[in-house]
């Protein structure tokens, strides 16, 4: 038999994790789901077209992504899955097997829900979210391809923010400088210096835009969960003044309050980058992210134009 679609993996993974309140390695969830779905050893050898991953592991990963979007599961650290309190309650209140409509709800009802939900948001509450149209029968192949790419970017962005949330502050500062260098700041990586630490005056990095270091950009990198407010941005502005600097970049994994944004706009020389934008930039410049090439065939009509030959 062929490897089932990812929605079929949702319940096996839910039940497996429900028996492990402290969580389990993702690889164990992969194998448990494969066993529950009676996937043969030969079928487990099937790889994605890119050849980078077994199909069953990829589909198990997407199933867990859907559980996370529904607020039922989490990835407390890389390669480790654990149900949330809502997930444990959901598994206990929904006897096996889940009705087809419930599986469908988990599979496609939360695809537009951002994984890092704000405090106080309700799990299993897709109201206010736009239901995906990616399975629409009237969508063209190009439309479906575009939707798939957009969904992949949303998923990778969420994984990036999860990974950034657990790295050390020192490593986060290094990541930020790697990104800025990849974006073209500094003639070489040596022109981007990490200076964060106690007594840093709110400056975590310095970028020399020219070889003599006559023009510099100062960087602050905050690996925060809560929104960054005006006081923090104002303090950074003060640190820039202390360095007689004209340019500063404030980067955070979270977001900025309206007051912080308004202050940065009023002083002009500070650029704010929030978590969503940071993830987008890391994908665009492939920092901590790799890309694969997919060849999409398109007829070359010019080749068949006999009059032009």
Image (tube, helix red, strand yellow):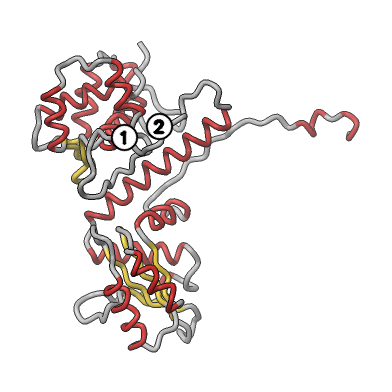
Q: Residue at x 41, y 62 (%)?
A: 179
Pick whichever, 19 or 234, lies toward us: 234
Is label 2 in contact with label 1 (beta carbons under 8 Å)? Answer: yes
Give the residue number, with chain letter if any, for mark 2.
Answer: 131
Residue density around tag 2, few if under 14, some if 14–19, many if 20 or more, within 10 Å: some
Q: Is residue 37 left or right of residue 299?
A: left
Q: Residue furthest top?
A: 1
Instruction: Please say if 303 is above or below 214.
Output: above
Give the residue number, with chain letter if any, for mark 1.
Answer: 126
- Residue 28 placement (x, y as % from top left): 18, 30
Q: Is residue 160 left or right of residue 22?
A: right
- Residue 55 placement (x, y as % from top left): 36, 26
- Among the 4 quarters of the image, the one containing residue 301: top right
Q: From mark 2 to mark 1, how far is it between C-alphas? A: 8 Å
Pick whichever, 23 or 25, lies toward us: 23
- Residue 162 placement (x, y as % from top left): 27, 49
Pick whichever, 266 or 91, lies toward us: 266
């Amino acid at each position: 038999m062929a490897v089932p679609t990812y929605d079929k993996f949702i319940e096996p993974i839910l039940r497996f994790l429900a028996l492990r309140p402290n969580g389990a390695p993702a690889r164990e969830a992969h194998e448990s789901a494969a066993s529950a779905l009676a996937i043969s050893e030969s079928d487990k050898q099937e790889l994605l077209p890119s050849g980078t991953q077994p199909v069953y592991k990829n589909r198990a990963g997407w199933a867990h992504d859907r559980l996370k979007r529904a607020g039922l599961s989490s990835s407390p650290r890389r390669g480790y899955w654990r149900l949330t309190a809502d997930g444990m309650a959901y598994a206990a209140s929904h006897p096996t097997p889940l009705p087809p409509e419930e599986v469908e709800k988990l599979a496609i009802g939360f695809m537009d829900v951002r994984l890092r939900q704000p405090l106080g948001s309700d799990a299993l509450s897709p109201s206010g979210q736009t239901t995906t149209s990616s399975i629409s029968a009237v969508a063209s192949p190009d439309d479906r391809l575009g939707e798939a790419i957009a969904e992949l970017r949303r998923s990778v962005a969420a994984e990036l923010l999860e990974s950034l949330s657990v790295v050390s502050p020192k490593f986060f500062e290094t990541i930020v400088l790697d990104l800025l260098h990849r974006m073209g700041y500094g003639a070489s990586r040596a022109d981007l210096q990490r200076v964060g630490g106690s007594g840093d005056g709110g400056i975590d990095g310095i970028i020399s835009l020219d070889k003599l270091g006559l023009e510099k950009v100062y960087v602050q990198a905050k690996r925060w969960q809560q929104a960054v407010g005006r006081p923090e941005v104002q303090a950074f502005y003060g640190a820039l003044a202390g360095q007689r600097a004209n340019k500063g970049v404030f980067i955070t994994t979270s977001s900025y309050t309206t007051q912080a944004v308004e202050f940065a706009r009023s002083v002009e020389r500070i650029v704010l980058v929030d978590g969503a934008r940071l993830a987008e930039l890391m994908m665009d410049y492939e920092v901590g992210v790799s890309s694969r090439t997919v060849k999409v065939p398109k007829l070359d009509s010019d080749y068949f134009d006999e009059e032009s030959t």
